[in-house]
Amino acid sequence: MVREARANRSSFLKVKCPDCDNEQTVFSKASTTVKCVVCGRDLATPTGGKANLKAEIISEFK
């Protein structure tokens, strides 16, 4: 029996920090808190699945 390949459900996202407008790449299913490298604001927090994003998504890399 042939099984269909599962679609990739995760991706990398380019996000913009709401405080300092720094652009940074984060993983959509981040397992740790992602902070802005410039100002230190939380950009993504883990939820057990997809991360809770607190920044504007600029683009998605699949």
Image (tube, rainbow, N blue to C red):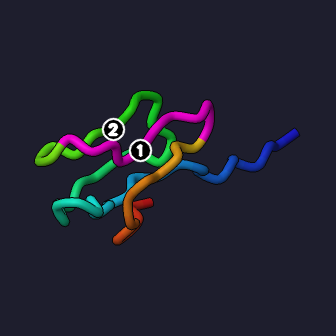
Mark number for residue 34?
2
For label 1, the SS is: strand
What residue type is disc 2 on?
A: Val
| Extreme residue toward the left, this view | 38
Q: Can you give x and y, in whole percent of width and height, for residue 39 in the image?
A: 15, 47
| Predominant SS along the magenta part | loop
Neighbour class for label 1 at 10 Å: few (<14), some, many (≥20)? many
44 in the magenta segment: yes
Q: Can you give x and y, in whole percent of width and height, for residue 51 in the image?
A: 52, 43
| Extreme residue toward the bottom, this view | 58
Seen from the viewer's position, the closer of residues 57 and 60 is: 57
The boundaries of the magenta stretch are: 40-49
Seen from the viewer's position, the closer of residues 6 and 35 is: 35
Neighbour class for label 2 at 10 Å: few (<14), some, many (≥20)? many
Q: Is residue 27 left or right of residue 50?
A: left
For label 2, the SS is: strand
- Which residue is at a point 11% across and 47% down the rendered structure image? 38
Picture quadrant of residue 59: bottom left
- Which residue is at a point 38% across and 66% down the rendered structure image? 56
User: Is 62 above or below relative to 29?
Assistant: below
- Which residue is at a point 34% across and 71% down the rendered structure image? 58
Give the residue at mark 1.
44
Q: Can you give x and y, in whole percent of width and height, for residue 44 in the image?
A: 41, 44
Quadrant where the N terminus is found in the figure:
top right
Q: Can you give x and y, in whole percent of width and height, for residue 40 in the image?
A: 20, 41
User: Is 48 above or below relative to 5?
Assistant: above
Do residues under tags 2 and 1 come within 8 Å of each other at their CB atoms?
Answer: yes
